[in-house]
Amino acid sequence: MFERLSVMLMKEFLELRRDRWAMFRLIAPLLIQMLVFGYAATFTVHHVATAILDLDQSQASRSLVSHFVATSRFDVVDVAKNQADITRDIEEDKAVIAIVIHAGFARDLENGRSAPLQVIVDGTNSNTALIALGYISQIVAQFSADQASRAFSPRVGTVPPEIGISLQTRPWFNEGLDDRWFFIPGVIGTLTLLQVVSLTAFAIVREREVGTLEQIMVSPIRPFEFILGKTVPFFLIGLGDIALVSTFGILWFHVPFIGSAWVMLLGASLFLLAALGMGLLLSTFSRTQQQAFALNFFFVNPFFILSGFAFPIAAMPKLLQWFTLVNPLRYFLVVIRAVFLKGVGIAVLWPQLAALAVLALAMLTLSVLRFRKSLD
């Protein structure tokens, strides 16, 4: 068995070495996509086009506007003169946010009354709108606190403000709330899944198209040995890809890695086995590389969306939540993010590792059985 398997492995590595562009295709696209995803995949919103309509023209209203200008979140693109200007800015996509300060704003603040502030949001991009509204709430809350502190002056005998609740936040594991620390580990798992499944899905189909599959099958090699010979090279390539993009993410994007490399290796190995089983299973349903590409696109894209990479699984419909249970990327993202940022071990991550082991065993078994059936 080992002799036949070693011959199969030698054949695969020789084919890889003879392909001049193979190493380029295995490395360059991963690094390029890592850069693109690393900078583009973010929930942080900067330079939101903002229109201002100040109908009060007081020191307080100008102070509030300066709070918005002082941040990099909002760019004032128009100082409107009337409501019609605001409407035109929103309709023509000149501004995403419009802030209207009504007359009497400063007077209401001086008299201790609530001073209403109108915010008009272009809801076409609901994600940007919601994030921008959150920033506005923080800025207005800070402005209110500053106004309250100025109103209280012991020297003039003013009445101190009522005692309230002081909220102090303390984020764990990502104190700066840098969303790249959340996305980069997810990008590592996603790119690895795309790479490994694509390589494996085309492996058997390519053998069938060039006519070498029948030659291999008339040899003493068994279907299980053939599958193993196809998976081991791609398994090693997958481990190399994970090590490469992880190192790149740590050095280039400064994402901390505080966990155990052995736990990371265990989780990556189980994830790669499940991904390899998926790719081999897709290849057994394909007769041509075009069919393999179509099946790969049909399955991998939903796995990416339903993995929790960007959209929380708890917010999905129940039916889709059940579907995510057979998605290996879902479990690996939990493992890699926890190892990178939390430093937890097997005692915490064993449910995800066990699920990856079950999926790997099931998919590889189905691949072997399906491959044997396709030969018959």
Image (cartoon, helix red, strand yellow):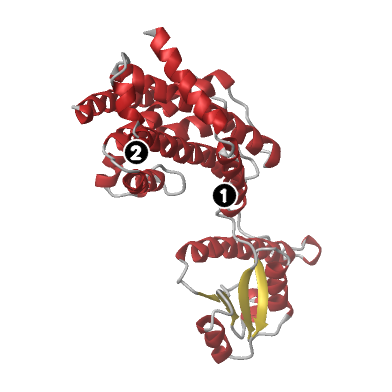
What residue is rendered at 65% in x and 66% in y?
A: 47
Give the farthest residue toward the right.
155
Q: Nearer the viewer, residue 203 or 241?
A: 203
Residue type beneath disc 2:
Glu
Q: Position of residue 236 (x, y in %)?
A: 51, 24
Q: CA distance from mark 2 to mark 1?
A: 34 Å
- Which mark is on residue 209? 2
Q: Is residue 193 visible?
A: yes
Label 2 sits on a secondary structure element that is helix
- Judged by depth in the image, the label closer to the viewer, 2 or 1, is 2
Q: Position of residue 150 (x, y in %)?
A: 74, 65
Q: Nearer the viewer, residue 359 or 223?
A: 223
In the image, taking residue 227 as reference, residue 196 lies left or right, namely right
Label 1 sits on a secondary structure element that is helix
Q: In the rendered structure, which disc, 2 or 1, sits on the residue that comes first in sequence?
A: 1
Q: Splitting the image into 4 quarters, where does residue 203 fall?
A: top left
What residue is rendered at 58% in x and 39% in y?
A: 21
Reading the image, the residue beneath label 1 is 37
Q: How many marks?
A: 2
Q: Is residue 65 above or below residue 26?
A: below
Q: Is residue 172 visible?
A: no
Q: Position of residue 117 (x, y in %)?
A: 56, 75
Q: Splitting the image into 4 quarters, where does residue 214 fall?
A: top left
In the image, taking residue 57 as reference, residue 37 lies left or right, namely left
What residue is rendered at 37% in x and 33% in y?
A: 207
What residue is rendered at 65% in x and 44% in y?
A: 176
Residue type beneath disc 1:
Phe
